[in-house]
Image (spheres, rainbow, N blue to C red):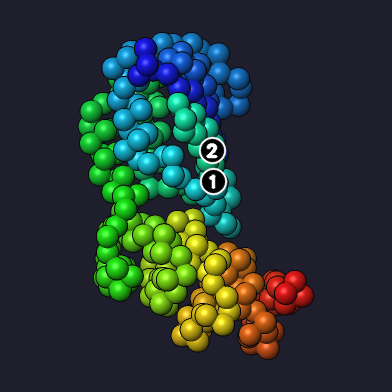
């Protein structure tokens, strides 16, 4: 029974779809359409629960960011997840965006409902989970990988590793933003935003090299009409470049730059 212990709620819905709602607690599972309270009860086997929790662990679901969001997309899909097991818990949700591995988790939930979580799903989850594994590479090595890699899992691995370096990875900002611009929207993900914030949050403006400031400024300019995704990064830099921000074609970027200055 210990293998089955745990609970989760999962909701997924999309435009013109009935969606899916699942509530599970200690081995018992209720499911139904996302628009209504789940009412169909089933009891997946111990083997299926064991595979499900192995997939959750392999995907590093416990480390997923709280929110995944792709702006300026209408009528796509939305999801919400809450899991608690033993001493660990996670809450995450998304709108038109999801972490690498989301499809594998969705398939595992569907497998619980259909009476068969596959071992193939576990093997895929282990492969996807590489993006969350710790890296021993230096900042310079990670920058080099980011500049040449075209593998999404590998790039997410690099982004998470750079975020763990914090302010020590400031030198990576130009390469990171360059890659995001080159491969947008695939690389402009919540993981990338999280990495940028982790790098900059603990840094003072004086510690940020001009090259990195230039890269951030160019990114804010070129990412229009989505300048809002840069606001958390620009807040520290706006006082240094307010005159340039006032030239920005987006009035939203100008307002936020001025607001950042006012809050200093």
Could you tell which of marks 2 and 1 lies nearer the N-terminus? 1
**Cβ–Cβ below 8 Å for labels 2 and 1?**
yes
Q: Is residue 109 above or below residue 150?
A: above
Query: Residue placed at 32% from the left, 33% from the top?
Result: 55
> Picture coordinates of residue 234 (x, y %)?
60, 73
In which quarter of the view is residue 78 placed? top right
Assign the C terminus to one quadrant of the image: bottom right
Residue 8, horizontal then vertical, whole percent: 49, 26
Label 2: how many Cα within 10 Å (few below 14, some 14–19, many 20+): some
With 37 as the anchor, is 6 left or right in this view? left
Is residue 233 shown above or below 65? below
Q: Which residue bears the numbered disc 2? A: 91
Residue 118 seen: yes
- Residue holding disc 1: 66
The image shows residue 186, relative to residue 13, as above or below, that is below
Q: Label 2 to label 1, Cα distance in Å?
A: 6 Å
Question: 249 or 85, which lies in front?
Answer: 85
Q: Residue at x 36, y 60 (%)?
A: 161
Q: Nearer the viewer, residue 257 or 202?
A: 202
Total marks placed: 2
Q: Is residue 187 above or below residue 243?
A: above
């Amino acid at each position: 029974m210990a293998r089955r212990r745990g609970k989760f709620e999962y909701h997924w819905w999309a435009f013109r779809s009935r969606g899916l709602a699942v509530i599970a607690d200690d081995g018992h599972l209720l499911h139904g359409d996302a628009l209504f309270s789940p009412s169909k009860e089933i009891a997946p086997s111990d083997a299926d629960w064991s595979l499900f929790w192995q997939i959750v662990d392999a995907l590093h679901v416990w480390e997923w960011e709280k929110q995944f969001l792709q702006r300026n997309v209408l009528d796509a899909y939305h999801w919400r997840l809450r899991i608690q097991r033993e001493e660990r818990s996670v809450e995450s949700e998304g709108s038109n965006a999801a972490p690498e591995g989301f499809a594998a988790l969705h398939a595992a939930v569907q497998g619980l409902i259909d009476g068969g979580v596959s071992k193939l799903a576990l093997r895929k989850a282990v492969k996807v989970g590489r993006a969350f594994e710790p890296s021993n590479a230096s900042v310079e090595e990670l920058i080099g990988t980011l500049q040449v890699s075209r593998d999404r899992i590998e790039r997410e691995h690099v982004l998470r590793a750079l975020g763990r370096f914090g302010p020590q990875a400031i030198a990576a900002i130009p390469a990171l933003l360059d890659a995001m611009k080159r491969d947008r929207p695939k690389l402009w993900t919540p993981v990338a935003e999280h990495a940028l914030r982790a790098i900059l949050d603990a840094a003072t403006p004086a510690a940020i090299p001009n090259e990195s400031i230039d890269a951030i400024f160019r990114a804010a300019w070129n990412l229009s009409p989505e300048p809002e995704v840069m606001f958390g990064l620009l807040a520290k830099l706006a006082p240094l470049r307010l005159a340039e921000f006032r030239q920005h074609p987006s009035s939203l970027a100008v307002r936020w730059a001025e607001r950042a200055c006012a809050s200093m």
